[in-house]
Image: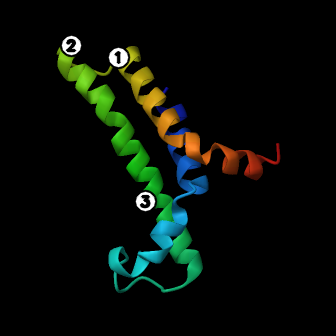
Amino acid sequence: MLPLILIVCMLNGLASPWLPMLWGTAPFWMAGMMPDNMEAITYLSSLAFSTLTLMLSGVPAALYERHIQAKESTTISLSIWLAAALLMSLPALPNVLKLASL
């Protein structure tokens, strides 16, 4: 189930409607040694949103695991993680459908 979670997070990073917000703030969060071209900014913005989705969607699953005092991840906690990632990716769904040409 973890590969499915990663795919959802990557699609959210690629098609997020909030990418222009990161483009505008790129001088503040990009390292000074990084190239200052649109391709690098787009790539790093997508990577940042993918990573942010992965981390934030894992919080409910981690809270669930803490609540049940699990030693390892369970199928239920991975399902919670996937559901949270899907909910966070809903705003990107129209853009994903455009990318898929559906």
Q: Which dot marks residue 68? A: 2
CA neighbours of label 3 inside 10 A, class few (<14), some (14 to 19), many (20+): some
Q: Position of residue 51 (x, y in %)?
A: 41, 51
Q: Which residue is drawn at 38% across and 37% down?
A: 57
Q: In this view, does 98 lie above or below 8?
A: below
3D distance between C-alphas at marks 3 and 2:
31 Å
CA neighbours of label 2 inside 10 A, class few (<14), some (14 to 19), many (20+): few
Mark 1 and mark 3 lie on one chain; the one further toward the N terminus is 3
Q: Is mark 1 on a helix, strand or loop?
A: loop
Q: Residue at x 53, y 53 (%)?
A: 13
3D distance between C-alphas at marks 1 and 3:
27 Å
Mark 2 and mark 1 lie on one chain; the one further toward the N terminus is 2
Q: In this view, does 98 lie above or below 20?
A: above
Q: Position of residue 37 (x, y in %)?
A: 55, 84
Mark 3 and mark 2 lie on one chain; the one further toward the N terminus is 3
Amino acid on which disc 3 is placed: Ala
Labelled pair 3, 2 in contact (Cβ < 8 Å):
no
Q: Name the residue under label 1.
A: 74
Amino acid on which disc 1 is placed: Thr
Residue 28 picture quarter: bottom left
Q: Position of residue 61 (x, y in %)?
A: 32, 27
Tell how many labels. 3
User: Which label sits in the foreground, 1 or 3?
Assistant: 3
Labelled pair 2, 1 in contact (Cβ < 8 Å):
yes
Instruction: Name the foreground residue: 44 vs 25.
Output: 25
Q: In this view, does 89 lie above or below 34?
A: above
Q: Mark 3 points at which residue?
A: 48
Q: Residue at x 41, y 75 (%)?
A: 25
**In the drawing, does residue 68 fall left or right of residue 85?**
left
Q: In this view, does 18 lie above or below 40?
A: above
Amino acid on which disc 2 is placed: Ile
Labelled pair 1, 3 in contact (Cβ < 8 Å):
no
